[in-house]
Amino acid sequence: MSPPDAASVSATGLSGEAAARTWQRPRLIANAWIRRAAWGGGALYLIVAVATLGVDFERMAAGVPRAAEFVSGFFWPDFTTRGGDIIEGFIESVTMTLLSTVIGVALSIPLAIGAARNFASGPVYLVCRSIIAVSRTFPEVMIAIFFVVMFGFGPFAGLITLIVGTVGFLGKLLAEEIEGCSTEQIEAIRATGASLPKILVFGLFPQVFPRLVGLGLYRLDINFRESAIIGVVGAGGIGATLSTTLNRYEFSSAAAVLVLIIVIVLLTENVSGFIRQRLI
Amino acid sequence: MPVREENATKVWQRRTPRGRLALWAGWALALAVLVACARQISEGTLWVFVADAHRQAADLLARMVPPDPGYMGVLWRPLWDTVNIATLGTLLAVAAAVPLAFLAAKNTTPHPAVRQTALLMIVSSRSINTLIWAILFVILFGPGVVAGIAAITLRSIGFIAKLLYEAVEEIAVDPVEAIRATGGSPGQVLTYGIFPQVFPSFVGVSVFRWDINIRESTIVGLVGAGGIGLQLDASVNALRWSQVSTILVIVFLMVVFSEWISARVRKAVL
Amino acid sequence: MSGNDKVLQIRALRKSYPGGVEVLHGLDIDLRAGEFLTVIGPSGAGKSTLLRCINGLVPASAGSCRLRGAEILGLRGAEMRAARRRIGMIFQAHALVDRLTVMENVLSGRLGYTGFWSSWARRFPPGDVAGAFRLLERVGLEGYEDRRADRLSGGQRQRVGIARALLQSPELLLVDEPTASLDPKTARQIMRLLRELAAENNLAVIANLHDVGLARMFSDRIIGLNAGTIVFEGAPGELTDSELSTIYGEEDWSTEEVADVSA
């Protein structure tokens, strides 16, 4: 039996002209010139970007033995030599994380209400939105630099940094959640003659509460991760320990810190994921 | 039970007595933990400096305003580097993350052991912040743009691969089965049945990460990994606050711009 | 009928899922070219599993299944795929790839005959493309080739699914609940189209149907499946109320009978 050919499929009563038609997949950009320009532009950018990298091959070659050293350090992480620093750094990170999340959540609630279009308007809305925008735009580390200058080295600057980050993050997402709330439930409470605080407690909070807890827990994860790096610019926490060990080429100790960070991140992620699942 | 009989009338309370007790105990415990945290931080803080903060802040502000526009001329090159770090880093990460995601997804992985390995790689990549990767690569490769690109790449691989493999696991199985039923090879099942389904999330995730990476690439310079962060570090150390504020304005504009682009692209593919 | 006319011969087909639950208890089915066989039965009777065992989407546990005399159960890899491309399948929820165009969906019927890189570049032989155009015209979707599949209505999508299966030039067509997600009128149109195309190409068809009325109207032969066993086999006219009760369980069938006649 010869392999069947698609053209042999009988389709009665059809003209033969269809057989001459060809087909090409429709292009994302229909205009051929614009398409070629887009490809050319992309290729040109890549070439120029790579050409201007300024790779120092000698320096990179010098890094190879160090890379080997680091990798071997990773297989035998050294928890003891700098044990004291590591423990202190972790306690600092954990306290910063917990406190900043709680304070941040508390502050973000009024801010989110102020930044929700269905509750606030005019200057209140604008002020709340700009606070959120500014605190979200700049990376935490950059914010930390300024707080270190203002408050001096140490965990307090880190705490304030994380609070600012939390407020921006939660403020935005919570405001969106509030704007998406069912207005009927709020109207129903308002219809009973309740004042604004009562409307919030009975009409709004029950609707946004699960989301608030979920986002808060999610932010707890993020804050721990961030607390591990803002120490690099002097804002306390495990990041300070890590950058010290790395700068002194104590790779085994650095590996110990990294392993601990990964373990704790995994732990908090799973716990917060579990709680969020139970709650929602 | 929340409803009790008391003097022959029903009394409604939100919680049972035991529930109330547990709730109070929970609050008390949480409060105790927070107080302990606060004390811990307080011990590590020099309150003299904190008390002085308002004066420091006012001083800082006075020095930062107005920004120094003349400094802009020096910033073009670091700006170009910053964009390159983010873009090239994202491209490399995407190239590595796509195969990793298919190895990690339950429905496309060749073997459970491969899946576990891929998941471990994803988790390690995700748990370590860009800045930490940057410190590592500056030690290994020396300061410069390459260390920054490597840092962005390694952090983004896990991020992109995680979101992508979750998307792969959520695809509709019917079309995949249909392509199998036509006699398509495994490669064709992948390209005809699965790729088209995950394409939107693939583009969305990549552009989203690029947007985050623009932000991240502004700070990798703080540890020597190239880009505008180098300039920021230098200006902060030299206490040239009007230069610092110029950089902040640039960063702000760049972040807003990248956010706008990423939002537009994501809208276009969905 | 000569022996060569026998397209499909299933003997003692069994399927049990891991855990030991057997869903097909040894089925025997024969199918001639040009014959339209309908399988009816309650949900969970094993209708879908039966079809999927034939083309190997679900591996059968025991038995034999011969396609034009050649055993196709237990084939693996390239041999399995070579057998699959001779068997077209039409799915319940049409199973189109939403983000591909209509033409790409139809051409995916030729994947079994096309190399990986050609299919990646969407370069199909001119004969395949011409065949696809003709089939699109035949199922009433002329001019829709560059539409994305998710922009079509339910009936149109099922027509694309039919075109895809027919572009395989199959010898056997497996049809799994083709009308389940369609309104009654579209369902009839789709069934009529299937019937016509099967006749035009002298195809052997096995179709699972929920709708007894449609089964009576469009099939040459009906098989009733209950809990993995064939409990009825015969011409549409032999399907009486008592037979229906054997297949589906006790029920007063009179109203449906009336509705069927009026429709």
Image: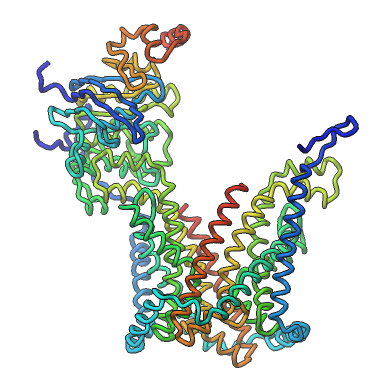
Instruction: From the top left corner, tell me how far across and down residue A47 is, in percent.
Output: 34, 76
Image quadrant assignment for residue B101 = bottom left
Instruction: From the top left corner, tell me how far across and down residue A136 is, in percent.
Output: 62, 68
- Residue A220, placed above or below residue C134: below
Q: Is residue C126 visible?
A: no
Query: With C31 as the anchor, is A111 left or right in this view?
Result: right
Question: What residue is at 39 percent from the left and 53 percent from the top?
Answer: B105
Please say which color scheme the image uses. Answer: rainbow
Instruction: From the top left corner, tell me how far across and down residue A226 is, in percent.
Output: 57, 71
Question: What residue is at 46 percent from the left and 84 percent from the top?
Answer: A250
- Residue A194, placed above or below residue C190: below
Query: With A76 as the anchor, is B230 left or right in this view?
Result: right
In this view of the protein, which residue sits in the foreground, B177 or A247?
Answer: A247
Q: Can residue B21 be seen in this view?
A: yes
Residue that sits furthest to the front in the current view: A80
Question: What residue is at 80 percent from the left and 35 percent from the top?
Answer: B3
User: Which quarter of the rendering shows the N terminus of chain A?
Assistant: top left
